[in-house]
Image: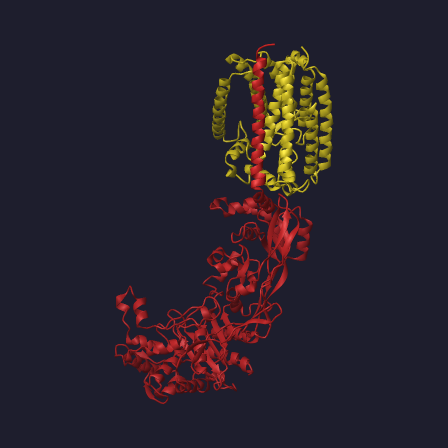
Amino acid sequence: MPLVLWATLLVVYGSVMVASATTGMEGGRGMLIRHVVGIVVGIVALVVLWAIDYTKLRAWQGPLIALGVLLLVSPRIPGLSGTAKGATSWLEVFGVRLFQPSEPAKLIFIVVIAAAIAQYEGNIDRVRDVGRVLAYLFGAVVLIMLQPDLGTGLVFVAITIAMLIAGGMKGRYFAYLALASVLLVGGALAVDSTLDRIAGKDVALKDYQEDRLLVFLQPDRDPAGAGYNLAQAKIAIGSGGLTGKGLGSGTQSNLHFIPERHTDFIFAVLGEETGFFGAMLLLGVYLALLVSALAVATSSRDLYGALIAVGIIGMWLFQILENVGMTIGMMPITGIPLPFMSFGSSAMVTNLAAIGLLLSVWSRRYGT
Amino acid sequence: MSTYRQELKSRFATLGIIILVVLAALLVRLWTIQVLNGESYAALAENNRVREISLEAPRGRIYDRNGVELVTNRAALAVSIDPSAEAIRPLVVRAQNDDTADDPTQAELKETFGELATMLGKTPEEIFERVADVNQEALRSRVVALDADMSVVAQLLERQEDFPWVQVEEVAVREYPNGSLAAHVLGYTGTISEEQYESSPEYAGYEIGDTVGKSGAELEFEGVLQGDKGWRRIEVNASGKPQGIVSEQAARPGNDIRLTIDIETQRVAEEQLAAALEEARKQEQYNARAGAVVAVDIATGEVLAMASQPTYDPSAFIGGISTEEWKTLNAKKSEYPLNNRAIMAAYPAASTFKAFTGIAGLEARITYENKPYYCGGRWTEMGAKWPKWCWRRSGHGTISFHNGVVQSCDTVFYEIGYEFYRREKEELQATARAFGLGSETGIDLPGEVAGRIPDIAWKKEFNRNYPEYQMWLPGDTVNMAIGQGDVLVTPLQLTMAYAGIANDGTVIRPHVLKEVLDSEGTPILTEEPQVLSETGVSDKSLAVMTRALVDVTEEGTARASFVGFDVTVAGKTGTAEVKGKDDYAWFVAFAPAKNPRYAVGLVIEQAGHGGAVAAPVARNVLAQLLGEPIVTVWATDDSR
């Protein structure tokens, strides 16, 4: 199965970049070890999910929903939470950081919503059905906003959109939804700033999140503050040129100009050190991976399996778009990892598990 | 299976297209950034990575004419504070904003700087004043103490954690081996001011916070003394921490200069001037506190000594002067010690002007050496309503022109002045101006004033708002003839004019720069004598005047000061009347009378008569120059 090949290539490529980015970093070796541990755990998850017959998952809808809710709420439970960069998105027990529960929650969300959409048999043309699907999304997003984690919320939205396309929602509903979300976002920003003014402090949406969104629209708004990350990432990628500066030789990266260089901004390191060719290679492998996943979807023996595959495609595609896009000024800056590339065990395990799910669908394509 | 199978294909196709579009969009964007604009981003990355810091060039040294060091450099340990440090920056911001109510309180300053202040023997306010100084580049660290005690420095270095914003560094500062000697000629250095920085292209390439000349030779020869900054390019990380040197260019030190000043003559001039002020106060001239002395080489215009009282210590400016000290230096009460009175103050020339009135009279054939005049003390030629008095109220009786100069008889010069008024040709003004009076001498020092020789046009313009005072009156010329009225001259001007008499009627431009030296000490520029003006006065008139001036020191108003002086000296006393002040004492001389070499001029504010305390100063300065013994010869004099 080519899926495994592409995933392996990505994991190797990602490990090389993480190694390069963490060299010379305080605790860099430990990070690399953690990265490898994540891969190993991920492979275990992959094998387990591959072995499970995905069709059986439909019967576990209730427990899966409960597990998903628990995962998303867990960081808010006293004694289980850890905070990083303004978001309480870690599960922490006795001060030991376990994982980011929103990562596996993505997969659970995909499986759950796939079952919900599949029951309409590929034809969603009633408002009530649309509403029911969106209720899942709404619930998940509300829970994520408790952390709050805007980027992950957007991933859930992207997953849902991709699955609604495959699930057969009528074109006009997409138009309505697009219009409604524009109004909603604009309204939310307006309400938020009014609330901030009335309360005299930062409530609801965090100011830094607003800033990141506005900086995206207006890059020179605040070059030393919120725009700094974007500016430095662009300089890193741009200065990589056609062939890059060579692994470990990126000045932007090694001199700490790129923030979060081994996690969210790993692509900036890649762009700087391997240049346009390296970036093109990465995007090429991503294309292969996504096409393989699409092949899984098309060959699925039932709509449920196809929807799971499409949800995973939506998740990866959006994360690629968002993560790469933010480093080159196409998307606002949010903290979303680049699939298989960013340092971070939770994401790595989740992505390898996603491969396992896809393989489960693929292996059972000839059933009844 | 159901019908959606067919539809699914197009939906998957849609997803496929979305995948392609997204990845293609990213690729196109990457192409524009990395390939089309790669070079400009590479430059930005390089800029990010590399910081350039400038290396200050050692300032050129200043020597006297014989190579004695007047200003040099030394290394000093400076305790400085980083104004951008976390603990400091908010205080600076609050002090620099417009809201004075927001200024840091004493308690806050004490909390932050209290311990450091105690160690350095300063107050927290003094320290903060330096830190919040706006005349410095924002990020440059501020020197709060120079030459701090070694034990204090050691303590600071040991306790770096307690004072993370304190740095100890070695800096080069000006050193003055002779203390305040020649302070006005040398000038002082300081931080370049914003006005200076923006004022002229001369300061292009300077940075806010650079040390520049602020007055005197330090300012005049700034371009020569400054040198060229070097630079060092260092690789830094995102927090600005240096990682290593990329490349560097050493600074080129400024050129040394050699002045025309002779430090020994300068020392005598300053000591004599100070002693004269003391003596004047002993003679009950209690307001005598200021004065100036100039000594020049007649043939070349080289200034050998230039002293001004009160004086100041240029080393007070090292590392930045405190506001308190600066205020004192600029207070009326302290008589503006920063002013170089030899060139920056204009006084009525008084009787010293009679030499030029006399020469003008001789040239115009109004008078001759033995022309007899009668001085009855009271002079009423302009009408009984406007009587003028000779300084000797009892009169000199019958007196020749020659003795009129020797005794400084006012009546003789009233007569000459009145004759000039009647001739209506402004010949007196022309002669005075030919000798350089009433205009700048062009000396190579900043801040010289022109003085004034009044005439009809000037008076009209000066009183343009008061028509009733615009007319030139006989009294104007008569007053000018004895150097009063509206005549104003600087001590240097007058000295150069007398040097002009000694120099066969040729006035030379005075200068203090002798040579500019290269790094090996070889002159690369030598200042040549320049003629300021050819007066065209006949040798005969000059000889008549010189004979009279010689007799001034031998039997006239200055004889007491030159008793026992082996060299013949030509000179003239003067006692200037200044409204609201005690009389100012003048003496100007040149020697030897035959083959003159040196001219000396001086004024002492509110010291009374010229022959009393001024002439003895000139005597001793000339004694130093001519190898005569220096003696104490204070005299009394009641002439004008």
Counting from the top left corner in percent of width and height, residue B224 is at 54, 65
> In the rendered image, what is the letter of the chain coloured red?
B
Residue A71 visible in the current orientation: no
Q: Residue visible at 72% across and 28% down?
A: A39
Given residues B464 and A64, the one toward you in this image is A64
Pick the front one: B224 or A339: A339
Task: Please name the residue shown 25% across and 77% down the image.
Answer: B385
Q: Position of residue A138 (x, y in %)?
A: 55, 19
- Residue A104, by quadrant, is top right
Asked where in the image residue A37 lies, by quadrant, the reply is: top right
Where residue B301 appears, as percent x and y from the top left, is: 49, 76
Q: Is residue A252 left or right of residue B427?
A: right
Q: Image height check: is B374 above or below A177? A: below
Quarter placement of the N terminus of chain B: top right
B24 relative position to B509: left or right: right
The correct choice, above or below, for A230 with respect to A288 in the image is below
Horizontal side of A289 relative to A329 (left or right) equals right
Residue A343 appears in the rendering: yes
Specify the quadrant that holds the C terminus of chain B. Answer: bottom left
Where in the figure is residue B210, as x and y percent of width and height?
A: 55, 57
Shown colour of chain A? yellow
